[in-house]
Amino acid sequence: MKIYTTKNTSPFYTLVCEEIILKDEENQEDILYFYQHKNAIIIGKNQNIYEEIKLEEVEEENIEIYRRLSGVGRSIMI
């Protein structure tokens, strides 16, 4: 098993790392990736932000929205 950690709290950074890890075709091991985001909403690649998120509230709170490579719904990082 490979274990990855980061202290970087940028959702953009951690999502890029996740994509690189997942696209590594040479890796045949299980992966455990630890990270902590600042406040953000992360949605899956197939999610519609207009159906999933109350955009007015998100904009009022200055919460950033990111799209994940996988399509497993949304995650709210607080």
Image: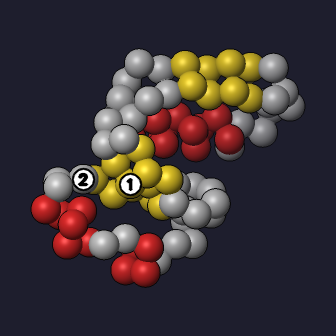
Q: Secondary structure at mark 2?
A: loop
Position of residue 54 in the picture relative to residue 45 (left or right): left
The answer to whether residue 59 is left or right of residue 3 is left
- Classify mark 2: residues with Cα within 10 Å, few (<14), some (14-19) or many (20+): some
Locate the N terminus and report the quarter of the image it occupies: top right
Residue 17 in percent (x, y) is at 52, 34
Where disc 1 sits, the SS reads strand
Q: Circle 2 sits on which residue?
A: 63
Amino acid type, mark 2 = Ile
Pinpoint residue 39: horizontal percent, then vertical percent.
Answer: 31, 43
Residue 29 position by quadrant: top right
**Picture quadrant of residue 67:** bottom left
Q: Is residue 18 left or right of residue 7?
A: right
Residue in the picture at 43% in, 51% down? 76
- Which residue is labeled 1 in the image? 41
**Is residue 44 among what the camera can see?**
yes
Q: Quadrant of residue 66?
A: bottom left
Query: Which residue sits at x=57%, y=55%?
Result: 69
* Observer able to see residue 12: no
Q: Residue at x 27, y 53 (%)?
A: 64
Which of 9 and 54 lies nearest the eye of the viewer?
Answer: 54
Q: CA distance from mark 2 to mark 1?
A: 7 Å
Residue 51, image x, y percentages = 43, 81
Q: Which residue type does callout 1 highlight?
A: Ile
5 vs 59: above or below: above
Please say if the residues under marks 2 and 1 sit with CB atoms less than 8 Å apart: yes
